[in-house]
Amino acid sequence: MKKNLKITTLSNGLKVLLKEIHTAPIISSWLWYRVGSRDEVQGRTGISHWVEHMQFKGTPQFPANMLDKAISREGGAWNAMTYLDWTAYYETMPADRIDLALRLEADRMVNSQFDPNEFASERTVIISEREGNENEPLFLLGEAIQQTAFRVHPYHHEVIGDMVDLLSMTRDDLFDHYRSHYLPNNAVMAVAGDFDTNSMLGRIRELFEPIPAGKEPARLARQEPVQNGEVRLSVEGPGATSYVQVCYRFPSASHPDFFALSVLDSLLAGPSNLNMFSGGISNKTSRLYRALVDKEFAVSVHGGAQATIDPFLYSITMTIHPKRKPDEALRALDREIERIKQEKVTKAEITRAIKQARALFAYGSENITNQAFWLGYSEMFADYNWFESYLDKLSAVTVRDIQRVANEYFKSKSRVVGTYVPMDGKA
């Protein structure tokens, strides 16, 4: 796979990864910035996501009212995402139209206007988004767990930010954040598709290399203290359905145990899709599905692993069956966790779990947009070698590895258990 890959760093610090794929006349270009919700302090939570929104509000060269039309007219698609550790922008275009995307990203790296009227309008949009989230039980529960699990580390808050900050932040706050972080030496450009590498690199140099490097922003680095005992919490809210979410400490994506835990995730709850840009697969053969859904403790159960720079959380989310109480489902879950820790997992189970995890990884890597995604995404928490070696590292996981990581990471004393209590029909 590496024979078509070129990695270079421009004189201003912009890292560029180019991968030729000549299966279709399409090119996908992604620009990743090393800034996300973990780079925000109290009073500025949600600022990275809000800046992402403002990047679609135009520059003098590309006014807001022409951006969507220009991309659509050329047959392209574009979007952006903000997460814990990064913000990313992408365009997937017909190969002979990619220059528009390159010019757009070079321009808005330095020339976004942050018009005060657009800023005020977008405040309303983001507050409405936050209010919509607050009607979702799993958002409310997840936010409460995240705030509890991270008392010190900046993973403490949701990407969208706290309402009080969304109401108080100013246009200048956002512009300062943009100017501090949207720098070529704080970015990675990843392009995959039907192009000639030398020509593409030449054009990227022409557009991006004149942009001056800036002072590399320092990232917040506050290590979360060890948790000394299980924490349980409950959240009350609208609806008629109960949920339980159990969150264990999970290592960073660059940690060697990440791969054994990924197989354990596949075995327990069905594989998590690390590529949030693509879908998932059925988890009906997983242990937790058979123990919780088939036996009517839960209507559904899902696991959630994330690839992050610092240790984050592995979450198991149960939608409680109407005939059951949350504590019944939690006890059934705990029985399965203890089985994994105490009883030797069979080689056949490991083989199936690895096969499913590998299949999901392949599904999330197959098209040109996903190939470009992985080029840049893996650079946000490790490097492209992480992606290249992922399948081999999964295949190397053994029965002994599974039992070891289950006992090391799935400890009740370091988990947070949250219950969503529906209030519809209650006084």
Image (cartoon, rainbow, N blue to C red):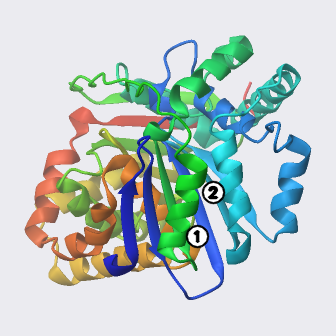
Q: Secondary structure at mark 1?
A: helix
Q: How many marks?
A: 2
Circle 1/circle 2 CB separation < 8 Å = yes
- Quarter-wise, where is residue 239 in the image? top right
Residue 298 image offset from top left, x and y in percent: 51, 58
| Left or right for 283, reference 59 | left
Residue 109 image offset from top left, x and y in percent: 62, 39
Residue 371 image offset from top left, x and y in percent: 49, 71
| Left or right for 59, reference 306 | right
Q: Is residue 65 visible?
A: yes
Residue extending furthest left?
400
Q: Secondary structure at mark 2?
A: strand
Which residue corresponds to mark 2?
90
Residue at the location (30% across, 75% down)?
353
Which residue corresponds to mark 1?
369
Three-letter residue code for mark 1: Thr
Which is more N-terminal, label 2 or label 1?
2
Residue at the location (76% across, 26% down)?
114
Front in this rendered view, residue 422 or 229: 229
Residue 166 position (above or below residue 423): above
Q: Is residue 306 visible?
A: no
| Left or right for 197, reference 74 | left
- Quarter-wise, where is residue 200 in the image? bottom right
Residue 395 position (above or below residue 49): below
Residue 271 position (above or below residue 120): below
